[in-house]
Image (cartoon, rainbow, N blue to C red):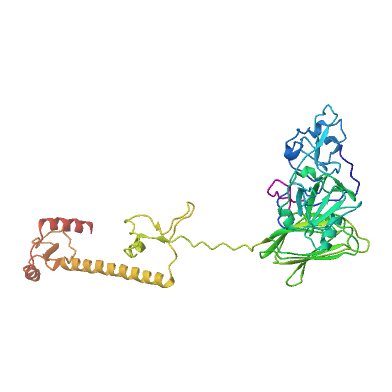
């Protein structure tokens, strides 16, 4: 089995990137998506289930079938180590990297390491060959029996170099980006030597350099890349007492999104503050008793000032957070309502435009509509509505007047005067002895009046009239019967 880690195993926040040549790397200023965030992959929850370089080795055994060994799903009922009814690589014992049980070989080997390129921290640039002639990193170098990753980073930072490399567990080399450009990448599993100064960290290998950016764990910095990672001072080592550090974040964009991947402060007197760099206003504050909420934290500030202070007794793992700038979302343009043309309005368009719809057709939208958009006429302006009302009213009144005049003309041409009689109605001059209807017709008027027999006045009046036609007599007889 792998080396048993002490209780105070250090954590690392890991977000890797794969550079050309196949070396595992994670630039501090371009963190990619990662499957684990600790230096030894103790929080790995990915799905790799084979050992060896890039899973090209032997298949892993299922954790619920390894009861004969020290670690199985039965030994992790709460799922703290990620064991279960699967055969994915895990690191339940705090070894230097994830591993799994395999079918026992003739040599008695029953477990192996898993090579997971995505388990390397941002700022770790990868594993590189070092033949010594010339050295992979051409700057100053040194050795220490208490070497840790941060010890080497601090040494090269003080020397003014941007890169630091650890080798064979105890050697430290400094260099520049030009050295990295001509470096020869090596498999990630070649850098598997435990640091002499800390059993939970890896410091390269035999003839292999693990190269880091010296900005990892620095106490101050000015970060302007679109995205990146900010570590607590001395990371991946624990921060010390009486630290007072600050970092300025000014990525492109109008807002910032922060995500805390690791947060472990000793007590409430160790405090991290987030302030608006422009106004100095305090936006958020976190300490050992008030950790940040899980998930992304979005702040409406174009630039931030991060300040960390620890008291005289404080020391703990610290924090690691990712950031990225966000452009302020542009509100969508309001979509104008669809313009609908009735046959009348379409007919008023210029002849050069689309032809008017045929008569009796439904209202035609002037622009294409979605399937669920109904077309209705646009509301008219008050002046247009008033004009239309006046026009309709005048038209209606004119039609009524024309009908009335036509009716009067008709009645004037065909008028009758009726007078009641006692006898059945007769058409023409009445010659009977009793009173009866006397109806005579003459254009433009007609007369109907009582005509006593031999009445000279009626005789003189009817002399100027002519009798009605047979059809008119029949119609008038029906009318008089109804009366």
Q: Is residue 391 left or right of residue 422?
A: right
Q: Residue furthest top?
A: 106
Query: Which quarter of the picture shows residue 262?
Result: bottom right
Query: Which quarter of the picture shows residue 186?
Result: top right
- 184 in relation to 336, above or below: above
**If the image is split into quadrants, where does the C terminus sit?**
bottom left
- 21 in relation to 213, above or below: above
Q: Residue at x 66, y 65 (%)?
A: 254
Q: Residue furthest front?
A: 133
Q: Residue furthest right?
A: 313
Q: Is residue 411 left or right of residue 313?
A: left
Q: Residue 118 placed where, x, y %?
A: 74, 46
**If the image is split into quadrants, where does the N terminus sit?**
top right
Q: Residue 50 placed where, x, y %?
A: 75, 36
Q: Is residue 74 visible?
A: yes
Viewer-proximal residue among 430 and 163: 163
Q: Residue at x 64, y 64 (%)?
A: 328
Query: Which quarter of the picture shows residue 93?
Result: top right
Examine the structure image and report whether residue 18 is included in the region drawn in magenta: yes
Viewer-proximal residue among 440 and 382: 382
Q: Residue 214 placed where, x, y %?
A: 79, 58
- 167 in relation to 420, above or below: above
Magenta: main secondary structure = loop
Q: Is residue 425 left or right of residue 345?
A: left
Q: Which region shows up in magenta?
A: 14-27
């Amino acid at each position: 089995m792998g080396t048993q880690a002490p209780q105070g195993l250090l954590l690392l926040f890991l977000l890797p990137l794969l550079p050309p040549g196949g070396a595992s790397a994670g630039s501090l200023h371009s963190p990619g998506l990662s499957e684990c965030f600790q230096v030894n992959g103790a929080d790995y929850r990915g799905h790799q289930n084979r050992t060896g370089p890039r899973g090209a080795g032997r298949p892993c055994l299922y954790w619920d079938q390894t009861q004969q060994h020290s670690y199985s799903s039965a030994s992790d009922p709460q799922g703290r180590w990620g064991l279960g009814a699967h055969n994915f690589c895990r690191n339940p014992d705090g070894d230097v990297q994830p591993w799994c049980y395999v079918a026992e070989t003739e040599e008695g080997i029953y477990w192996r390491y898993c090579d997971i390129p995505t388990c390397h921290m941002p700022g770790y640039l990868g594993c590189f060959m070092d033949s010594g002639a010339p050295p992979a990193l051409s700057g100053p170098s040194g050795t220490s029996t208490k070497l840790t990753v941060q010890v080497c980073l601090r040494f090269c930072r003080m020397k003014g170099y941007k890169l630091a490399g650890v080798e064979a567990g105890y050697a430290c080399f400094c260099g520049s980006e030009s050295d990295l450009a001509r470096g020869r990448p090596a498999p990630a599993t070649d850098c598997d030597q435990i640091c002499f100064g800390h059993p939970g960290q890896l410091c390269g290998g035999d003839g292999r350099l693990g190269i880091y950016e010296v900005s990892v764990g620095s106490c101050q910095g000015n970060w302007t890349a679109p995205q990146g990672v900010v570590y607590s001072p001395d990371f991946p080592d624990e921060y010390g007492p009486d630290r007072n550090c600050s970092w300025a974040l000014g990525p492109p964009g109008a807002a910032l999104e922060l995500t805390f991947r690791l947060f472990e402060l000793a007590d409430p007197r160790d405090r991290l503050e987030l302030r608006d760099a422009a106004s100095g206003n305090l936006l958020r504050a976190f300490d050992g008793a008030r950790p940040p909420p899980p998930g992304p934290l979005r702040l409406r500030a174009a630039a931030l000032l991060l300040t960390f202070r620890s008291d005289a007794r404080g020391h703990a793992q610290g924090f690691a957070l990712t950031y990225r700038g966000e452009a302020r979302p542009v509100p969508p343009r309001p979509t104008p309502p669809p313009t609908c043309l009735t046959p009348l309005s379409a007919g008023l368009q210029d002849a050069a435009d689309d032809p008017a719809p045929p008569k009796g057709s439904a209202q035609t939208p002037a622009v294409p509509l979605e399937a669920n958009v109904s077309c209705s006429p646009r509301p008219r302006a008050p002046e247009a509505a008033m004009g239309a009302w006046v026009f309709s009213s005048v038209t209606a009144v004119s039609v009524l007047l024309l009908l009335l005049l036509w009716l009067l003309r008709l009645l004037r041409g065909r008028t009758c005067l009726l007078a009641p009689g006692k006898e059945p109605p007769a058409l023409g001059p009445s010659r009977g002895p009793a009173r009866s209807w006397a109806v005579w017709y003459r254009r433009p008027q007609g007369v109907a009046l009582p005509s006593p027999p031999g009445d000279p006045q009626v005789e003189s009046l009817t002399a100027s009239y002519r009798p009605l036609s047979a059809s008119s007599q029949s119609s008038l007889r029906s009318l008089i019967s109804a009366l």
